[in-house]
Image: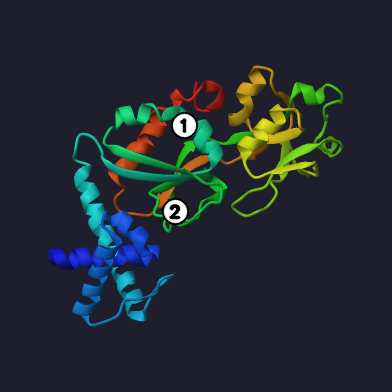
Amino acid sequence: MRGTQFAELSAFVAVAEHRNFRKAAAQLGISAPTLSQTIRSFEERLGVRLLNRNTRSVALTEAGARLLADAQPVLEDIDQAIEAVKAFRDKPSGALRLSMPHAVARSLVAPLLPRFPAAFPEIKLEIVADDTRSDIVRGRFDAGISIGERIAKDMIAVRLIDEFRMMAVASPAYLANRPGPATPEDLQAHNCVRLRSEWDDSIQPWIFENAGRRLEAAVDGSLVLNDMGLVVNAVLDGMGVGYLPEILISEHVANGRLVSLLDSWYGHVSGLFLYYPSRRQIPGALRAFIDFMRTQARAIPASLNPLAG
């Protein structure tokens, strides 16, 4: 493939994936008019219209859809070949885009961020905090981080954190004028701060297990939030009982800002995983991040990290 053909094909794939000339031009590092002329020349040389476009939208023609389906694997193979060569360098390099929930970004990844650039100065790291479980392929992310239950089966998953517990907690101020619950059923008498999941718009169930018994507590309350960090803050402010991951609130329990309730009853989450599309070759920057997260887990404060010991 000659250089001009490769540039035209890459330009077409960028526009086809973004369905937007401006965004595709930004990705390629060229101006929108230059990109438009490149596509026009490509179509003229092929003698086939690949894109239908107007001032508001871009759509693939039948020929364009066929070319995109055939071209994407070819360009991915080229990218993988280049990444394989980069793996021979002393330090991995390139851009790395990751998608993860806000709570994971704040509590588990953020504490490590100062160390990562120092270890890998040639990697440009971009983290997008997103609770909607967006499609990482469509969003052009290299990988995502999520709990195991929410990862599609066609993804490669690498465990970062083992199974952890979900706990019912409240602040001393909230408990000052009312008795704490003795059983999960007692939560019906409490104001519970609930979490609405952005990825499926459902209210998070409060599920507890004890000695082989499993039940879902019927809870209600005056406040529903769509961000786990906001739930933590609301519970700290005495607004009600929260159902939260132990790895997020154990430090608050240790310093007395929160009180653990129902100590023999806990929910369980399968663990936290980094996941990425199945590929023959993992990009060097992604491999470096995976290894870093595993070996530097002790950099996270022990109260927030179940792997630290």
Q: How is the image coloured?
A: rainbow
Q: Label 2, on which residue?
A: 136
In the image: residue 220, left or right of residue 303: right
> Dot 1, how many residues are within 10 Å of its Cα: few (below 14), some (14-19), or many (20+)?
some
Label 2 to label 1, Cα distance in Å? Answer: 20 Å
Q: Nearer the viewer, residue 74 or 177?
A: 177
Q: Label 1, on which residue?
A: 110
Q: Residue at x 28, y 56 (%)?
A: 28
Q: Residue at x 76, y 32 (%)?
A: 239
- The kind of residue on which mark 2 rests is Ile
- Residue 40: % across, % down: 25, 74
- Residue 187: % across, % down: 82, 36
Residue 144: tell me if it is visible.
yes
- Residue 222: % across, % down: 79, 41
Whether residues under marks 2 and 1 lie with C-beta atoms below 8 angstroms apart, the answer is no
In the image: residue 26, left or right of residue 104: left
In the image: residue 88, left or right of residue 33: left
> Dot 2, how many residues are within 10 Å of its Cα: few (below 14), some (14-19), or many (20+)?
some
- The kind of residue on which mark 1 rests is Ala
Q: Quadrant of residue 46?
A: bottom left
Q: Residue at x 32, y 62 (%)?
A: 14
- Residue 285: % across, % down: 31, 41
Q: Quadrant of the N terminus?
A: bottom left
Query: Which of the two discs, 2 and 1, labels the residue nearer the N terminus?
Result: 1
